[in-house]
Amino acid sequence: MNSIRTALICHPDTPARAVDGIAVEIILSFDDGFALNFIVDGRIADIVLPPGEGQLVIADSATDGLWQGTCFEAFLTEEGQPDYTEFNYAPDGRWACYQFDDYRSLLHPDELAPWDMAAERSAIRYALRVEPGIFPDTGSKLALAAVIEELDGTKSYWALAHPPGKPDFHHPDCFALTLAAPGAA
């Protein structure tokens, strides 16, 4: 099993007020595929999240438009290929999955529901763990991102890397992480 921890970078045109930082832990396993643990540090009470301590129920079907509020995202492609899969996860258990054949060229929505989602919440940290239930190939490229909506309407856009211009999580520059085989050094 491999575990990688990386930080997301806030887009310079969308500064956050309540968020100090976002990290993502990626866990790879031959048996379980991959899991993502998005960890938000800051004034959690100032972020648009469902009420409660983080309990959630996974939605039965996909929901479009999750990126319009607080949402955690992953994009997966094979090295050198133009097609990719987009996964969106909302903190209340809603999700969406899309297949693209090229940059922003949507083939179709997909019904790849997450195997599992779990959340933990405190005054200074929110964590959402998702297991998409897929097994990426060694050498797959991963883009990770988050949209954080604050109670005052401020939205910040976070990613592993940002291309020039406005936030664009689909841009090839965002696919900044190459996945290695589980157990590889």
Image: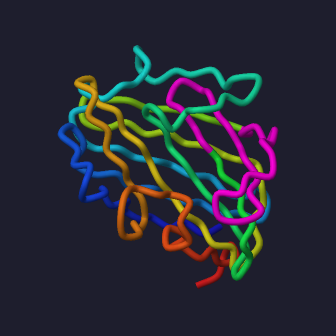
Side of 140 relative to 41 (left or right): right
Residue at horizontal 71 percent and vertical 65 percent from the top: 102
Residue 29 lies in the magenta-colored region: no
Q: Is residue 25 above or below residue 147?
A: below
Side of 178 relative to 30 (left or right): left
Q: Position of residue 30 (x, y in %)?
A: 77, 65
Quadrant where the C terminus sits is bottom right
Q: Is residue 97 above or below residue 24?
A: above
Side of 178 relative to 122 (left or right): right
Residue 41, by quadrant, is: top left
- Foreground residue among 14 and 16: 14
- Foreground residue among 70 and 113: 70
Question: What's the image's color scheme?
Answer: rainbow
Residue 161, by quadrant, is: bottom left
Residue at horizontal 44 percent and vertical 19 percent from the top: 50
Q: Position of residue 100 (x, y in %)?
A: 74, 57
- Number of numbered discs: 0
Residues in magenta, as a range: 88-115
Q: Is residue 149 above or below residue 74?
A: above
Residue at horizontal 67 percent and vertical 37 percent from the top: 96
Residue at horizontal 25 percent and vertical 54 percent from the top: 13
Residue 53, by quadrant, is: top left
Q: Is residue 90 above or below residue 87?
A: above
Side of 104 relative to 33 (left or right): left
Q: Position of residue 146 (x, y in %)?
A: 44, 47
Q: Position of residue 42 (x, y in %)?
A: 23, 40
- Foreground residue among 56 and 165: 165
Quadrant where the N terminus sits is bottom right
Farthest top residue in view = 51
